[in-house]
Amino acid sequence: MDKIYVNGMKFYGYHGAFPEENKLGQRFQADVTLELDTRPAGESDDLNQTVNYAKVYEAAKQVLEGEPVKLVETLTARLADLLLEQFEIVDACVVKVTKPDPPIPGHYDHVAVEIRRERD
């Protein structure tokens, strides 16, 4: 299966389990891998035969800057579901949402949730 990657999309959202996260907000990052057959687009050079990367970004923005939720798991699942809903050509997707600065004590780079969803 062919893959399209749209990685390192950065957003500012108000998600989290703690009240200060919902009030102050924080950074989030999304990485998306879309699984589909890209041969028709490669042969035709026609954007209508593939996924528009700008629309992938807009879907991620809609979720990550949208209605606040408590869990990164919820954000990740919502984005995966939206991508499969919006892009019928996509057979499956892998979505990773990273929270670089969660309010937990300790030294670490980030926390993230990655899921894979495929069409039924």
Image: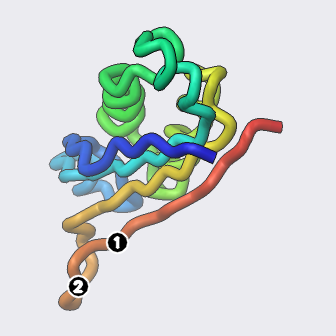
| Residue name at image x 39 percent, y 55 percent | 97
From where the camera sits, is residue 67 visible?
no
Judged left or right of residue 99, residue 1 is right
Answer with the quarter of the image where residue 109 lies: bottom left
Mark 2 Cα shell of 10 Å, populated few (<14), some (14-19), many (≥20): few
Q: Foreground residue, 106 or 98? A: 98
Depicted 118 relative to depicted 85: above or below:
below
| Residue name at image x 20 percent, y 48 percent | 25
Judged left or right of residue 26, residue 71 is right
Depicted 23 relative to depicted 16: above or below:
above
Q: Which quadrant, please, contains the C terminus? A: top right
From where the camera sits, is residue 99 visible?
yes
Q: Position of residue 28 (x, y in %)?
A: 26, 51
The type of residue carrying mark 1 is Val
Farthest-out residue, right: 120
Answer with the quarter of the image where residue 83 lies: top right
Depicted 51 relative to depicted 75: above or below:
above
The type of residue carrying mark 2 is Tyr
Tell me the residue that label 1 is attached to. 111
Q: Foreground residue, 19 or 64? A: 64
SS category of the residue bearing label 2: loop
Mark 1 Cα shell of 10 Å, populated few (<14), some (14-19), many (≥20): few
Instruction: Kindly indicate whether the residue at mark 1 contacts the one at mark 2 (C-beta within 8 angstroms).
Output: yes
Tell me the residue that label 2 is attached to. 108
Q: Foreground residue, 99 or 16? A: 99
Judged left or right of residue 96, residue 88 is right
| Residue name at image x 34 percent, y 42 percent | 6
Depicted 112 relative to depicted 15: above or below:
below
SS category of the residue bearing label 1: strand
